[in-house]
Image (cartoon, rainbow, N blue to C red):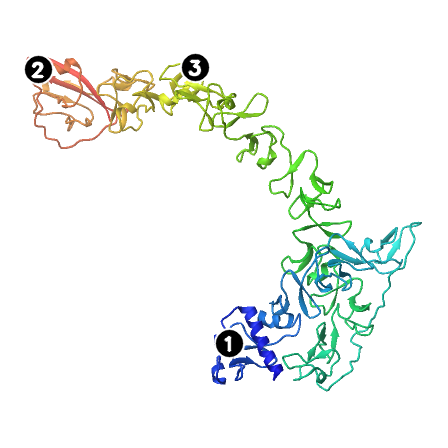
Amino acid sequence: MESSLLHVFLQIFLFTLATSTDLSGLICEGNADCADIAGSTCNTNLKLCECFGNQILSSTMQKCLAVVHGAGDACEEDVQCSAALLNGGTCQNGKCGCTDGMHYLRGRCWTSKALGEVCDSDGECAFLVEANSVQCLDNKCQCAEGFYQREYSDCRKRVENIGEPCALNSDCTYDGGFCNTSKLCDIIADRGKLKVNHKVTKSNNTFMHTATKRGNKELGAACSSDPECGTLNSECPPSGYCKCKTGFFKSPTEDKCIPEIGGPCTNEDCVINGSSCDGSKCVCGMGTAASATKQECLNQTIAYNRRCSEISQCTLFGTRVDCKSNGGSSNCVCDASSRHIVEDNICWIVKGPGQECSDERDCSVPYKTNEFSDMYIDCVENKCTCIEGYHPSSDGKNCNLDAPDLGDTCTENSDCQVGNSICDTKTKMCACKTGYYADSEGACAIGVGGSCSVSEDCASVANSECMANKCQCPAGWTSNLAISECLPITNGLNEECAESQQCTPSLGEFGECRDELCQCQKKHHLVQGTCTPSKGLGDDCSKGYECFLPVSTEGLVCRNNKCSCDYGLVPAENNAYCTGELPRDLKKSRLECRPRLGSCFSPRTFVFPHSSLFVSHNRFSGARHCGILHPHRRVSPRLAQMKNWSLGNIALSKSVTLYVNKYFYVFLQLCFYSKHNVLYSMKIFDML
């Protein structure tokens, strides 16, 4: 009864710890109340639904799940792993393991402590290869006796005899020792003395140990006390079913509890292939490493960037390594915190500018993608320092080339060594920051807009004052382009100037200083004191003032949204101005005035645009006078003096528009009779 209650409380505790869920759904009076939880029954004493002894409640409170017994066991939810591995147990890819920052050892998850970190027990000190390589000594994780420290986080076994197995040159710790191509410790001729301080007893046993049964119940059988469980190193836990003790796991083929790597042993106990009992713990042999579950000795990957199935195989390269997938397979590579040092075959920690160091290999900076270099950084007085001519980058991870002068190439502001300079984001060159200008000495001096507290701070800007903590030009003055001087603002066109900034306040944005005088920019003209874009003949317009010709604007108008010459005028041949002379190809009229017939004859048919004058069938018939004066047309004084024009009632049967030449002029010669039968004629033309 006591064991059953303990089991129920354990379920509730683990469930609450893993899910932080309201437990009201577990309250019951009878089994019917537990129907929603598959596999559960009602504990009438506690009035709570419970799972059977070898099961635990799921996080959804909808079913009972099998209790797992250790790392690597199949699982569905984290709660199953927490029951076996305690705090830190998680279900990863269908198998129980430890969460990041923790490691598995002897039946539970431990918070991983690196070398030099504070510890309370040996289990906290994570080991890579051999279980007895680290220990918690004086409350600090350290390499155990017979092991040497490599980098800052790895303890490897000392090999002190020629001919013993090794993996690295550094394993052969005697003077002149090295690891030869046969992976045996050797010695350079005539070097050193050999020492023998540490020996191990090895075992090649593979599941040869015979367990001595105490009771008659096998693993997985129901039990009420430990003596009932007959398998050596088994026990009866609160769940009420025989299982292997902590630090042991069930053999996949026999009813045996096998010591995990790192578990207690005598020589015959370590039956994992490739393991041996070193002192009092099962360890993996040279060239192998313990799996994450501590149930196998896996062959180590000996070449960098070669294949691996789990990170344990990559431990030859230290602790700062990943078994990283590259699409289809995984390889041993250094993690983001380290770089691979070829001569030592290790992933060495990367320390950047300003970080503490004790070894010249500590300091390195990014060189290429996923590569590092120690070419630009050294360990100086226990601090990583950029070499001369280089400086720390703004993120503190790199050493950038100094840019000592304005105009030098740069990548970020810190590259520019001149005071008050920045790295221009567009040109990627060093330039003075806003409010400063480059003086004759190559320095950045305070300019218009620069910070100040008194006017004396603005001495580098002629005619400026300190106003609102900024060097500014007084009223009636403006800054030059270089912001190094205040210049007087001019009052308008043709006033003397040195820079265009003096002209724009009065002439507008299209004003400029040209030939030391304020003028409008080319293709612009002055309109009511402001420079305005000029429109030439044929250009679109909306207002008359937009039309402008440099030679003369006489007769230039905006008509029908086009800049045109006024009626009675035509463009000069170069379109430079309007003139009263006809273009050459219009001077010869094709109209003939025939007074005797009383008509005007033309070999063609015309339409006079924007007027009432039409010529139909090449003649006017039945009209006393040949001619119509459009009421809005400008005419010469001579024509204007003529009176009593007859408009006539002309029947129009056909009209055709004729474009006579490239200027789009329609030409018409008017002829008519006066009262005294004297023939007069005049030429009138217009632009379409």
The x, y position of residue 350, in whole percent, is 69, 48
Q: Which of marks 3 and 1 is nearer the N terminus?
A: 1
The quadrant holding residue 227 is: bottom right
Is 132 in front, or is 602?
132
- Residue 172's disc is none
Image depth: mark 3 or mark 1 in front: 1
x 59%, y 21%: residue: 441
Q: Is residue 292 above or below residue 34?
A: above
Residue most toward the bottom? 216
Is 53 in front, or is 429?
53
How many angstroms separate mark 3 from mark 1 (CA)? 91 Å
Amino acid type at circle 3 is: Glu
Q: Determine if residue 580 is in view.
A: yes
Residue labelled with disc 3: 516
x 14%, y 27%: residue: 612
The quadrant holding residue 130 is: bottom right
Residue most toward the left? 675
How many angstroms separate mark 1 from mark 2 (CA)? 119 Å
Residue labelled with disc 2: 674
Decide: few, some or many residues near mark 1? Use Cα within 10 Å; few <14, some 14-19, many ≥20: some
Disc 2 to disc 3: CB gap under 8 Å:
no
At numbered mark 1, what does the secondary structure look like: helix, strand or loop? loop
Residue labelled with disc 1: 62
At numbered mark 2, what does the secondary structure look like: helix, strand or loop? loop
Q: Which of marks 2 and 3 is nearer the N terminus?
A: 3
